[in-house]
Every structure is written in structure tokens, then in C-alpha cells.
């Protein structure tokens, strides 16, 4: 059996198209979304990410600005800066670019972003809404995984889902989003691997999602025949970018599989734009 490639690019284009229509609609009502990204210090890899954000926002017609803060800024100064952005009515969305300088409490700083401006869905209030089954501004990658799965038209009811990785912004929210669709979700992590149980869990998965950040952690022949495989991982292997799943062998078993690059990444970017419009609506219409 040879699986089909689940291209993120097509899904991303569809989301962007819908978002553009929604943006036109709210602009007609006098709302101009503006996204501000806060970066502390210099970081070449986040600079690439910021440039991409800017390009995407501009192509969509969303105002975008980067605020570069000195690397020596204290945590309380950074929080005060974010609070000023929270109070600025012209700003409808805030991104806090990671990493922050060592010693800063990332979760504490993220919790200071006004929930209705938190386009990346990292504030505990927004993560909490997922727990209640009412995601408003959820983490972009978690929503991207859900979009990719839904695009296959699979009925999640009772399906065996295995989520490998339990990070706060990918693994845990994905698991909650899918539990609410009545999938049977197992979450694997380092403890699963250390006990030598990862292969057994993966082999059961009708839907396998992997967000670890270790090249080819999941062997292709572990993939159950007919499984849907969503590979979130991004790893540099020599001069290539690869996922967490051995793609060439996995595609021989999977029904659908996301490529890396070109799978989860483009959909995540499109969801960020959609969340930006959602945030602008939350603020402007007092939702
Ligand atoms: P993270 O916060 O580092 O989380 C990684 C998770 O993997 C943790 O739960 C960790 O468990 C678990 N883990 C580590 N080694 C493991 C092993 N051998 N077996 C099973 N689980 C293991 O990473 P993240 O932010 O979720 O990102 C994961 C990957 O996705 C990275 O490659 C990242 O670059 C990529 N990513 C891609 C996108 C995109 O848009 N395409 C977006 C976000 C992230 P412990 O905490 O217990 O060690």
C-alpha cells in the first residue's frame, strides 16, 4: 500500500483564502488588525521566522510591526512592555518571540499577554478554554494538526490516536482537541521511550501524530497499515530538513502522511493569520 501525501500547502491556501474574505468583512466595519511581535535580543533563527511572519501579514493586508528589545532587559521590564501593548488600542495581536534570555520565566511572561490579543494561544486562559472544549485562540500548531486530520475526512469517533510528545503547545493541546472529538488518545513521551514501549503504542495508532524534534525517531515499519501520520517535527539532518518519522518507509504503510517540509508548517502559518483576525474580532466586538 502506498499512502497519499497530505500537503499542507493546499490546506494553508484554503485557510488563507477564507481568512482574506473575513479580513475584508471586518475592514468594512472599520477594524484594522495589527500584529506586533516582541523579540528580546538577537537570534538568527527567530529572525527568519519574523521575516516570514511579516511577509505573510503584508501579503494578507494585516499591519505588522517588530519590537526589538535589548537583551539585557529584565523580566519585569519585559512584562511592563507587554502590558503597554495590551493597553494600546491600535494593536490587536501580540506574539512573544522565543527564546527569551535565560533566567526569564517564559510561562509567566506569556501569561501577561492579554488573552484576547494572544494570537499564538499560549496564555493559560486560552489553553484553559481548550480544556473546556471551547478553543478560542488555541496554539497554531495544535489547530494545524486538527485541520490536517480533518482534511482527510476521517471520522475520529473511537479512533486509536497516538500522540508522541507532550509539550504544552503541541502534544497536550492536540490530545485535548481530539479527545473532544471522541477519539481514544494515548500520549507518549520520554517515559514511554525509556520503558521501551514507544514502538508498541505507535503500532496501534490509526492516527499517529509526532511532535518531538528527533530525526527519524519513528521507524517507518512501526506505522500501522492505513494509518494517518502527521509529522510535526522539524530536524536538520546533514543539509536536509526531515521530520520525526522515517518518511520513505512510513508512506508504504500509511493512508495519508504529511511531508516535512510542506506539511504542518504552512498550515501553522495560515492559522496564525486566522487567529490574528479572530483576535481583532474578539477585541473590536467585545466577544
Ligand atoms: P518540545 O517542547 O521540545 O517537546 C518535545 C516532546 O517530545 C516532549 O514532550 C518530550 O518529552 C518528548 N520527547 C523527547 N524525546 C522523546 C523520545 N525519545 N520519545 C518520546 N518522546 C520524546 O517540542 P515542541 O515545541 O512540541 O516541538 C516538537 C517538534 O515539532 C520540534 O521539532 C519543533 O521544531 C517542531 N515544531 C514544528 C512546528 C511547525 O509548525 N511545523 C511548530 C512547532 C513545533 P519530555 O518533555 O518528557 O522530555
Image (tube, rainbow, N blue to C red):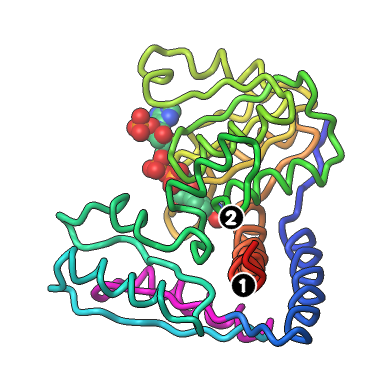
Secondary element under disc 1, as helix, strand or loop, is helix
- Give the left or right position of residue 103, taking residue 18 as reference: left
Secondary element under disc 2, as helix, strand or loop, is loop
Residue 151 appearing in the image: yes
Q: Quadrant of ligand 1?
A: top left
- Which percent across, then down, holds residue 248? 66, 40
- Which percent across, then down, holds residue 63? 57, 86
Which residue lies under the disc numbered 1? 280
Q: Is residue 275 magenta?
A: no
- Which percent across, then down, holds residue 256? 77, 39
- Give the left or right position of residue 49, taking residue 4 as reference: left
Q: Residues within 10 Å of mark 1 (few under 14, many from 20)?
A: many
Closest to the observer: 69 or 218? 69
Q: Considering only vertical position in the picture, is 47 above or below 237?
A: below
State the separation of the CA atoms marked 2 and 1. 11 Å
Residue lying at 79% horizontally and 42% vertically, measured from the top left: 150
Magenta-colored span: 34-60
- Which percent across, then down, holds residue 207? 70, 29
Residue lying at 75% horizontally and 41% vertically, measured from the top left: 149
Which residue lies under the disc numbered 2? 137
Amino acid at each position: 500500500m502506498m499512502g497519499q501525501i497530505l500537503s499542507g500547502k493546499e490546506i494553508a491556501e484554503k485557510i488563507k483564502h477564507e481568512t482574506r474574505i473575513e479580513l475584508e468583512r471586518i475592514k468594512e466595519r472599520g477594524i484594522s488588525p495589527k500584529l506586533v511581535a516582541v523579540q528580546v535580543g538577537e537570534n538568527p533563527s527567530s529572525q527568519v521566522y519574523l521575516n516570514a511572519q511579516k511577509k505573510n501579514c503584508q501579503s494578507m493586508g494585516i499591519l505588522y510591526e517588530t519590537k526589538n528589545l535589548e537583551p539585557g532587559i529584565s523580566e519585569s521590564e519585559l512584562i511592563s512592555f507587554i502590558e503597554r501593548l495590551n493597553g494600546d488600542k491600535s494593536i490587536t495581536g501580540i506574539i512573544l518571540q522565543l527564546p527569551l534570555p535565560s533566567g526569564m520565566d517564559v510561562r509567566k511572561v506569556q501569561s501577561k499577554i492579554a488573552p484576547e490579543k494572544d494570537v499564538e494561544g499560549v496564555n493559560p486562559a486560552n489553553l484553559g478554554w481548550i480544556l473546556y472544549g471551547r478553543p478560542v485562540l488555541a496554539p497554531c500548531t495544535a489547530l494545524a494538526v486538527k485541520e490536517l486530520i480533518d482534511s482527510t475526512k476521517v471520522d475520529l469517533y473511537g479512533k486509536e490516536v497516538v500522540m508522541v510528545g507532550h509539550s504544552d503547545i503541541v502534544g497536550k493541546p492536540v490530545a485535548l482537541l481530539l479527545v473532544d472529538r471522541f477519539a481514544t488518545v494515548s500520549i507518549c513521551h520520554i517515559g514511554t521511550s525509556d520503558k521501551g514501549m514507544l514502538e508498541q503504542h505507535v503500532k496501534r495508532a490509526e492516527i499517529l501524530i509526532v511532535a518531538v524534534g528527533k530525526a527519524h525517531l519513528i521507524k517507518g515499519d512501526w506505522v500501522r497499515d492505513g494509518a494517518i501520520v502527521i509529522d510535526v517535527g522539524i530536524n536538520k539532518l546533514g543539509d536536509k530538513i526531515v521530520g520525526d518519522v522515517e518518511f520513505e518507509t512510513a508512506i508504504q504503510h500509511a493512508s495519508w502522511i504529511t511531508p516535512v517540509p510542506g506539511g504542518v508548517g504552512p498550515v501553522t502559518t495560515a492559522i496564525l493569520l486566522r487567529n490574528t483576525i479572530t483576535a481583532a474580532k474578539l477585541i473590536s466586538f467585545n466577544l
